[in-house]
Image: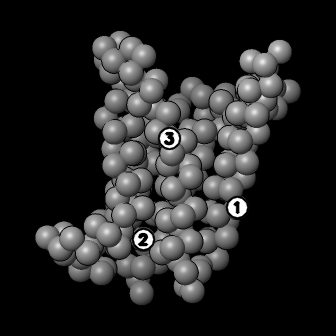
Amino acid sequence: MHLNFLANILAFLAVIAYIFTLLPSMVRALLPQFKSTKLVIFSLRHRRNIGILAFSLALFHGVWIGIERQLDFYKFETYIKYFQGLALLTIFTLLALTSNNWSVQHMKKNWRRLHYLTFLALFVLPWHIIDKKQGNWSFLTPISLFLAFLFIGFFIWRNIQDYRNKKK
């Protein structure tokens, strides 16, 4: 139970850090009156580092789960059962590896395209939480789900606004 608690804490902290990477762009697009708040400015200024923190926490979460459940990565069933978590970790790995000036300069438009994967992660995240915590919620589970669904709502709202603005 000790490792499970630690894995849950790491996962929750990863969700919080990930949400902080999304915060500046969502607030600037949807709630511009709040774009000058200290929290938004801090998140924007340190977005890359916060993203790398989110990746690190998610990686440690995955390692703890692997240790606790004694996962056998030589079995195909492991990849099927943990598909969402592995997909999220893959996305966060790609984003973390390219969260540097060299990647931005050399990848140009492809860097931006690659970093749109963060929005795919936004939709996979609640699926992962619901699937893995089914019947075994901690007090952190509803908070994580609320944040994920809130930012999915923000994402949809933002895209509707962008669509309306392009239509005009």
Camera-nearest residue between 76 and 73:
76
Label placed on residue 118: 3
- Residue type beneath disc 2: Ala
Whole-percent x, y for residue 114 in the image? 41, 31
Q: Residues within 10 Å of mark 3 (few under 14, many from 20)?
A: some
SS assignment at label 1: helix
The residue lying at 73 percent from left, 25 percent from top is: 162
- Amino acid at pointer 1: Phe
Can you identify the residue that label 1 sits on? 146
The answer for how far apart the CA atoms under marks 1 and 3 are is 18 Å
Q: Secondary structure at mark 3?
A: helix
Q: Disc 2 on helix, strand or loop?
A: helix
Question: Observer-nearest residue: 16 or 91?
Answer: 91
Q: Is residue 162 visible?
A: yes
Q: Quadrant of the N terminus?
A: bottom left
Local crowd at mark 2 within 10 Å, few (<14), some, or many (≥20)?
Answer: many
* Residue 36 percent across, percent down from the top left: 77, 25
Instruction: Return the disc, 2 or 3, that comes first in the chain's sequence.
Output: 2
The CA distance from mark 2 to mark 3 is: 22 Å
- Binning the other alpha carbons within 10 Å of mark 1 as few (below 14), some (14 to 19) or many (20 upward) gives few
Q: Earlier in the sequence, mark 2 or mark 1?
A: 2
Q: Amino acid at mark 3?
A: Thr
Q: Measuring 74% from the left and 26% from the top, which residue is drawn there? A: 163
Q: Which callout, 2 or 1, points to the residue nearer the camera?
A: 1
* Residue located at (39% from left, 14% from top): 108
Q: Which mark is residue 7?
A: 2
